[in-house]
Amino acid sequence: MIRTGAIWATLIAALAVPLIAAAGSPYLAWRDPAYILAGFAGILSLGLLLLQPLLAGRYLPGLSAVMSRHIHRWIGLTLVLAIVVHVAGLWLTSPPDVVDALLFASPTPFSAWGVIAMWTAFGVALLGVFRKRLRLRFRFWRLSHTALAGVTIVGSLVHAMLIEGTMEIVTKTALCALVLLASASTLAKLKVWDIRRRP
């Protein structure tokens, strides 16, 4: 019971502290509501990326395998929504910058990483939603799903670390490190690359 409580308390802190720290950022001064909403949607997206591998690897105590899968799917859809809000908010703030980013013409390196992460995140979600309709073999589907998720995670982490913005640097670095650690641990546990394994 104590271990379970400690795990959940640590997870809640990992998700909440970056948001609280960002709320006191000087970058928010005189910013439009759309910009602030976009920034916090981006921070939320990073937090959701921590939950996904933990759910996939069934590391969260008190959740059954079925419940973990269901929550994983809903978190994935929420992540897509948060990304859309993030991009839409930036579009309202500065349309030319968003267009340049989408066309990979932006002079800022973090933009390209963010766009790549966005499209692969959409791909992961589509694979999840249309899994049965696509009629793909489970091993191939899981490998494709994981590969796209991996690109999303790497792209998102690089995108976040390159930006000097709303997120406070220490909490941002800590959250990114946790996402990377959780993802690597789940990847090693599931061994999706082993085609001899059965689902």
Image (spheres, grey):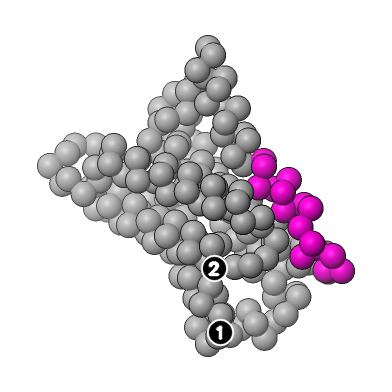
The mark closer to the camera, 2 or 1, is: 2
In the depicted view, which residue is nearer to us: 70 or 49? 49
Label at residue 106:
1
In the current view of this chain or complex, which residue is farthest to the left? Answer: 196
The answer to whether residue 157 is magenta is: no
Task: Identify the magenta region.
Answer: 16-33
As drawn, which residue projects farthest toward the right? 30
Secondary structure category for the residue under label 2: helix
Q: Farthest residue in the top direction?
A: 1
Residue behind mark 2:
162
Left or right: 65 with respect to 9? left
Residue 47, percent from left and from top = 58, 47
Residue at screen point 51% across, 41% down: 51
Q: What secondary structure do most residues of the magenta stretch adopt?
A: helix
Residue drawn 47% across and 28% down? 60
Vertical comparison of 171 with 3: above or below: below
Q: In the depicted view, which residue is nearer to us: 127 or 135?
A: 127
Magenta run includes residue 32: yes
Q: Is residue 172 visible?
A: yes
Point out residue 191 in the picture as x, y percentages from the top left corner: 24, 42
